[in-house]
Image (cartoon, rainbow, N blue to C red):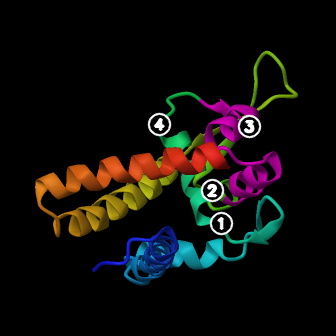
Amino acid sequence: MRNTSLAFQTEQFTDALWRLFRVKQSLIAVLPEDLASIKGRLGDIQFESGSRRGSDYSSFYRVGIHLSQQGDPVTMSDLCGASSIPPSTATRIVDWLVENGHAERFSDPEDRRIVRVKLTEKGQELYRAIDDFISQRVELILHQFAEKEREELIRLLRKLVEAIDRIA
């Protein structure tokens, strides 16, 4: 008889989550050389995420993806809102992007107190490379599942995210 108690399921679910976190480390270990170099330089930035400090690559990725999808320069407040990160973290990320030639800052022509940001062509290339790498890795993972299993996995992951959002 299978043990389907909530305690057993909780233990199994927690174990699966920890395994997923370890997968993240293995994905980072196989970064192409150009992305690994950038990851190494990113380690010098101290991002803030709530009360903890440390390198937060997901914030870096969210900022860049938002910027890469914009045609015109965006305000820092719009960037923070769209990326769901605090202004201090956005400022550090943008500082790094600007210092490394991946982004430019602009004064707003109507209000010089407002700072706008836009990726340079080099920045666009960086985020295309990151996005391509992630897409390739996800495709390799999803290829291990039948189409119906992929559909069910995606449905369940969305349901999981919604449940987490409700209790967070």
Q: CA distance from mark 2 to mark 4?
A: 16 Å
**Residue with the mark numbered 4:** 69
Q: Bounds of the magenta span?
A: 73-96
Residue at x 59% of width, y 45% of height: 165
Q: CA distance from mark 1 to mark 2?
A: 6 Å
Element on which disc 4 rests: loop
Q: Position of residue 123 (x, y in %)?
A: 51, 52
Say what amino acid the circle numbered 1 marks.
Answer: Asp
Say what amino acid the circle numbered 2 marks.
Answer: Ser
Q: Are marks 1 and 2 in contact (CB under 8 Å)?
A: yes
Q: Does residue 90 show up magenta in the picture?
A: yes
Judge the density around disc 1: few (<14), some (14-19), many (≥20) Cα neighbours within 10 Å. Answer: some
Q: To which quarter of the image does residue 109 belong?
A: top right
Element on which disc 2 rests: helix
Q: Earlier in the sequence, mark 2 or mark 4?
A: 2
Q: Earlier in the sequence, mark 3 or mark 2?
A: 2
Label drawn at residue 56: 1
Q: Earlier in the sequence, mark 1 or mark 4?
A: 1
